[in-house]
Amino acid sequence: MGAVTRTSESLSPELYDYLVAHSAPVDDVLADLAAETERLFPGQAGMQIGPEQGTFMTLLARLSGARDVVEIGSFTGYSAICLARGIPADGTLLACDVSEEWTTVARRYWERAGVADRITLRLAPALDTLRALPDDARFDLAFIDADKEGYVGYWDALVPRIRPGGALLVDNTLSHGRVVDPAETGAHVQGIRDFNDRALADDRVDVVLLPIGDGLTLARRRD
Ligand SMILES: C[S@@+](CC[C@H](N)C(=O)[O-])C[C@H]1O[C@@H](n2cnc3c(N)ncnc32)[C@H](O)[C@@H]1O
């Protein structure tokens, strides 16, 4: 998991700014969270999803009628707010992370956003959390955005738990173009490549890899 810039893949800065300016504006809660994350954790702030991706995820959750959502990798809480805003007031979001420090900020902003009551945070390696779920736990939408070496494992644990017609979103799946650079042999990029191959070959889902952020895979669980 390395620092990433908060822009969509392969857009000039001017075009990216135009795109953001012509998307629904983020409110003060998300703007303040982005600013505070940058101030508190300047070396990691780029891990946060960008504003256009957040708006896309809110709209996707709402359009799909998702009620029960799971997030792998919450950091300071930005993507969780975007997802939680797309589900009904009685919906649920299971947020998985390992960092007490980063999610302390998240909890504060979930309260401020008025979505804390929908979110359950589990501080443990996400694969342990997923494996400990009751056999009948099911989700309408999953968002994977944690350690890239773990993506295939998260996918394998989550796909059977996604209801037919439900969806998975997986972040950083172009890894800033490094997926097509043969010189990139590190575990991070290889984890992404392995995941992309795995998702494409999985006949339980239909998959599209979108150039949002530094690659966002959207998969729909077949009926
Ligand atoms: C890219 S950041 C998530 C960014 C977040 N989705 C957002 O938009 O702000 C990755 C997060 O994954 C968490 N993480 C790393 N390894 C993990 C693991 N094995 N289990 C759960 N979370 C993990 C890190 O603590 C970090 O907060």
Image (tube, rainbow, N blue to C red):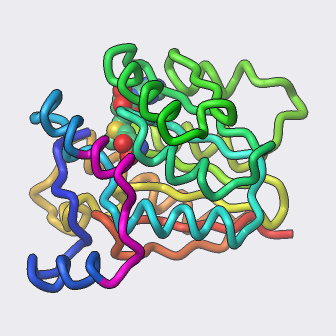
Q: Relative to residue 16, is residue 112 drawn left or right?
A: right
Q: Nearer the viewer, residue 159 or 75?
A: 75
Q: Quadrant of residue 2?
A: top left
In which quadrant is the C terminus drawn? bottom right
Whole-percent x, y for residue 157 in the image: 66, 38
Query: In this rendering, is residue 101 above or below 166?
Result: above
Q: State left or right for residue 184 relative to residue 142.
A: left
Q: Is residue 44 magenta?
A: no
Do we see residue 149 in this rendering?
no
Q: Ligand 1 sits in which quadrant?
A: top left
Residue 220: percent from left, percent from top = 68, 68
Q: Residue at x 66, y 73 (%)?
A: 206
Residue 32 highlighted magenta (yes or no): yes
Give the left or right position of residue 90, taking residue 2 as reference. right
Task: Where is residue 95? Give x, y as percent.
Answer: 57, 32
- In the rendered image, is residue 74 in sight? yes
Residue 176 in the image, given as x and y percentages of width and height: 20, 63
Q: Residue at x 28, y 76 (%)?
A: 20
In which quarter of the view is residue 172 placed? Answer: bottom left
Count of marks placed on residues: 0
Looking at this view, name the residue that lies furthest to the right.
Answer: 136
Residue at x 16% of width, y 56% of height? 5
206 lies above or below 49: below
Residue 2 sits above or below residue 223 on the image: above
Q: Which residues are magenta?
A: 22-34
Q: Report the quarter where the N terminus lies.
A: top left
Compared to residue 127, the image places residue 91 above or below, namely below
